[in-house]
Amino acid sequence: MPFSRQQTRAIRLGAVPIGHGAPVAVQSMTSTDTRDVAATLGQIQRLAAAGCEIVRCAVPDEEAAEAFKAITSASPLPVVADIHFDASLAVRAVENGAAGLRINPGNIGGESAVRRVVDAARAHGAPIRVGANSGSLPQDLREKFGGPCPEAIVDAALRQVRMLEALGFDQIKVSLKSSSVLDTIAAYRAFAAVSDHPLHLGVTEAGGLLAGTVKSSVGIGALLLDGIGDTLRVSLTADPVREVEVAWHLLSACGLRRRGVEIISCPTCGRTEIDLLSLLEKAEAALAAIKAPLTVAIMGCVVNGPGEATHADVGLAGGRGQGVIFAQGQVIKKVPEADLLEAFMAQVRRAEEEYFRRQPTEDRT
């Protein structure tokens, strides 16, 4: 790893270790109505299959808090309850199996309400994530700093942390989010300089799949490369599964974690003589089932393709009417264009089997 990570305090969300050098964990949030247990569990299963490690569910009312009992008992992931304004919902969610809470101590109902939540969280071993968000800063901090700047976000987060620490509670994770990428980066950097609490990274309200991916990658990626961050969520106005997919690509690009296949593909040029976009889409769908951390290449030119992807475990490069299958830059065989994908996937599966033969204890699930 080309950089060192900040050493934060260790906490746990269910079976997932967080902080103190633990792997950066991938988180998402369900978009279903939490009161619909079947739909929520179905989405959690899809998220888990995509590589999600922590899931958060909104708890808007008593019915949703009660649904937590069924959700947490069947969920393959630790479930965090997202609570606003009502301390009783936080207490009920923890009693019904929530592995953690996401609250804002400043809007939960005063000191006695915060104490109730802390007592319940402590009794059930549930960490609390406190979050400062540029869109919901206390009015006094807006006035003090002239608006939702990074300094105001940091002050808001420190205020919430101190409220919990004053009650003897230290199982805390912190987020400092803004829809501004630069403000988000500045706030996390400033907080990390004065606190060792684990940090949950994210750019809030980042947007749809394209814009949200770009903003999140810049903001979260910059912090990860600083060594900052213990969990992350790529917030997208899209299917939550896409959040998880982007998160894993981001962790891989930062050299922190790998899951499944990394695909190298060329941007196409005038030498491309095959339908590379269609081929890539079909390959992506087929490669989703591969569990080994392989690097594969989908290239459009048989002249330069293998050489441009010399480090790929397996690759294909197409030309007019035919293509080649290669590994580590060496051509293995030529095949008709119509058979390229089938021959490529056969070679990928062989590479996967070889990988697991070398690492017999590797988890294939």
Image: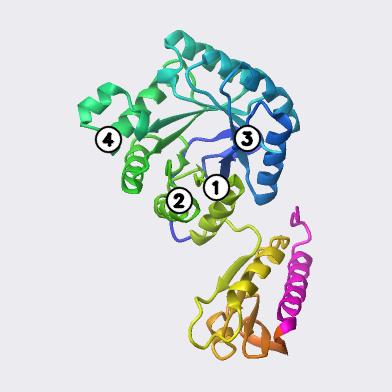
Taking the image as shown, residue 297 lies to the left or right of residue 228, namely right
Q: Which is more N-terminal, label 3 or label 4?
A: 3
- The image shows residue 32, relative to residue 107, as above or below, that is below
Give the distance between the C-alpha atoms of the residues marked 2 and 1, in whole angstroms: 9 Å
Residue at the location (43% across, 36% down)?
A: 175
Query: What residue would you read off at disc 3?
Result: 32
- Mark 3 or mark 2: whose residue is earlier in sequence: 3
Distance from disc 3 to disc 2, alpha carbons, whole Å, reads 20 Å
Question: Which element type, helix, strand or loop, lies under badge 2?
Answer: helix
> Element at badge 3?
loop
Q: Is residue 185 above or below residue 143?
A: below
Q: Earlier in the sequence, mark 3 or mark 1?
A: 3
**What residue is disc 1 on?**
238
Determine crowd level at label 2: few under 14, some 14-19, many 20+ residues with C-alpha closer than 10 A. Answer: many
> Depth check: 65 or 35 in front?
35
Q: CA distance from mark 4 to mark 3?
A: 34 Å
Disc 2, disc 1: CB below 8 Å?
A: yes
Give how far across and how far down residue 53 sits, in percent: 63, 43
